[in-house]
Amino acid sequence: MRVEVNGLDKHFRKVHAVKDLSFAVEPGRVTGFLGPNGSGKSTSMRLMLGLDNGAGSTLFDGKSLTGHKSVTRVVGAHLDAKFFHPKRTAYAHLRMLGAESRVSKARVNEVLQLVGLESVAKKRPGGFSLGMGQRLGLAGAILADPQVLILDEPANGLDPQSIQWMRDFLRFYASQGRSVLVSSHLLSEMQLLADDVVVIARGSLIAAESMNTFLARSSGSSVKVRTNNVRKLAEALNAEGLALSVNAQEELRIPNVTTDQVGDIAFRSGVALLELTAETASLESVFLELTESGQEYRVGVPQSAIGGVQ
Amino acid sequence: MRSALVYEWRRLWSVRSTWVMSLLYVVMAIILGAVPLYLDSGAKQSWIGLYSSSGNLLCLIMLSVVAAQTFGHEYRYGLIRLTLSEFPKRERVMIAKTVILAFYVAIMTIVGWSVLGAVGATKPSRMSADVVGFSMSGSGLPHLWQVPVFGFAYCIIAMSVTVLTRNLALGVILPLLSATLIESLITGFASLAKGRWDWLVHILPFNNASAWMDQSTELHFAGLIFASWVIGFYFLATLRFHLRDA
């Protein structure tokens, strides 16, 4: 099911939290929703679900949420790891959430088992860890087997095994032709998980494209070379009009070039190569480049790091 | 609509506090029934009179806690966002909560009457002819319907205050304070003002509710004025619920 977000806009008094935001979440793909703290990700997700009042619309398969017969069969949302009554058991919580789409008791048990909470199903979640709360939230989101998942920071507080489980689960979920929109601050994780990215800063759209296209925006992709004859290779590369830099370990870095090109030049120059590595940009570096000016809350620099401690 | 009602029913009974409040309600009804019955007094007891008068306020507190929790728990724990992501049409949520609350009040009223009847059966010699639970006849019977209606109306006010303030405690305390203290104080001050503030006394919600319950002719249109307050609170709460971010 395709999700089309059109012109979302939201003010909190004088703060323009979301500015005319439009993007699409495609079926069969995991879409990462990225942005610095306070950039408007959670507000946008709430607007998409109709929880906040604002301008714009979100269409699920061409219809607004209220136009669908069963909402929970269309979209499952997990917005916070603590959205439960601390004294209502995990099982009762899911039974309650299952009322809209008449989910059976067997399905509740199945989902509890899927997220690894079957042993604490009859326990009150007030004592759950953050990770267990995330699992319960995810269980609620997938309970009615919806076509679209909207997840806000679902990996927060999860241990590495659980993160890997969630990644595999979401990829499997999307592979069945369903749409997944997931926000996260764990950029390395997002690079492994997401097929597409939507990046916002200060409420405005920065990018909405495939992960590969997004990574290609970076000015930081380069080729690293080690050789015994740095000078000869450097001359050959310069002769081809390529800029390069050499570090203290005598490693060459040539930006915006492929390993094929460098290998070919080295071969023609008769220079033996000890290492030839493509250094592609990480999601983190591209994200930081693009959102540098869009940070709502900037961190200070410790005095000791700038020589303040004598 | 059916699924919203099931959701609300499950929400209501899946927290311990609903059971605790309901149990306290029953205990309170037993105490309210037993104490006057076993006091050494020649007068006969009328359960309708007891149940619908000031003693009933203690039972109402238990009901109003459950009523305030209807929205109070949802706001306190962020559950309202889960609820509204399942039921984006907010009027459905409001209607479901109101209907289930009415049903809950009706159940508890029947339970309360049954308990009072059972307690009364232990001292049949002390019961007056119009005792509810023994003979469904007598002078109080035509006004029997007022007991659950007042209970429900009180709960609607508690629920509405909770929606307006997003604070469970205020939803319980404000109606209680108004019924027991604030209106008495206003009435007291008004009596010092040589009639200039009588109009204010005449429009106070619980003054009118009390007059309506007691069949008092002191206040005109008491039932209507109280109903206006209840509808006013409910309307404002519904409006707020619709317009405010979840």
Image (tube, coloured by chain):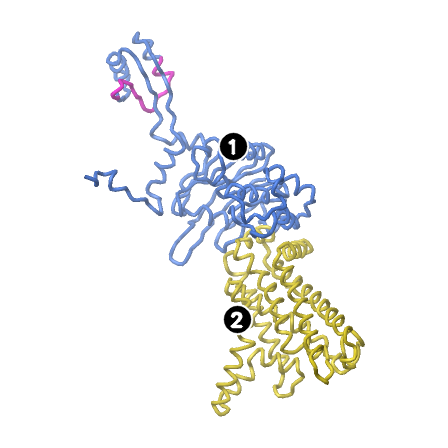
Q: Quadrant of the N terminus of chain A?
A: top right
Disc 2 residue crowd, few under 14, some 14–19, many 20+, Cα 10 Å: some
Tint applied to chain A in the drawing: blue
Q: Could you tell me which secondary element the residue under label 2 belongs to?
A: helix
Q: Is residue A183 above or below residue A92?
A: above
Rendering coords of residue B232 (x, y %)? 57, 72
Chain with colour yellow in the figure? B
Residue closest to the eye, A134 or A25? A134
Residue closest to the eye, B19 or B219? B19
Chain for mark 2?
B
Q: Which mark is residue A161?
A: 1
Q: Could you tell me which secondary element the residue under label 1 belongs to?
A: helix
Quarter residue B137 falls in: bottom right
Q: Is residue B94 above or below residue B141?
A: above
Q: Is residue A32 visible?
A: yes
**Does residue A258 belong to the magenta stretch?**
yes
